[in-house]
Image: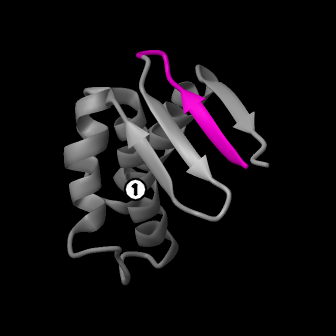
Amino acid sequence: MSTEIIYQDGSMSEFHDGGGSSHHGGLAIERMRLITAKSALTIYIKYQGKMQLTRNGAQNAIANVIEPLTGKTYKRSMKGKQEALDDCVELLQRLENNTVRYTEEES
């Protein structure tokens, strides 16, 4: 069984039952960037800055993914990172609410 998700711009993500996925087009790639940014910020906040996905991962996620999409500038404090995470979750929710999902049974 596989699931295909089609985004507003016609881009597509395909998720395979045995694991793995493929992403083609603008919004599909942007969704993956947002998921990665969300993970980086979640880990940073959970461990109070003592653990990160990569060196400067949380700050890079804010500067390279979230700030360009929201147009906001976030503080480097924990409160600023929490605000960026909240905005990231909201962006992901908006993106996922405007998709069409198809699930195919493989025989």
For residue 2, say whether it is visible: yes
Residue 61 magenta-drawn? Answer: no
Q: Is residue 88 left or right of residue 30?
A: right
| Residue 44 image position (x, y, % from top left) | 40, 70
| Residue 21 image position (x, y, % from top left) | 50, 53
Q: Would you name the residue on which mark 1 appears?
A: 36
Closer-to-camera residue (43/24):
24
Residue 28, placed above or below residue 45: above
Name of the residue lying farthest toward the bottom: 50
| Residue 66 image position (x, y, % from top left) | 31, 40
Closer-to-camera residue (49/7):
7
Q: Is residue 60 left or right of residue 30?
A: left
| Three-letter residue code for mark 1 | Thr
Span colored in magenta: 1-9
How many numbered marks appear?
A: 1
Q: Residue at horizontal 43%, vertical 76%?
A: 48
Residue 3 magenta-drawn? Answer: yes
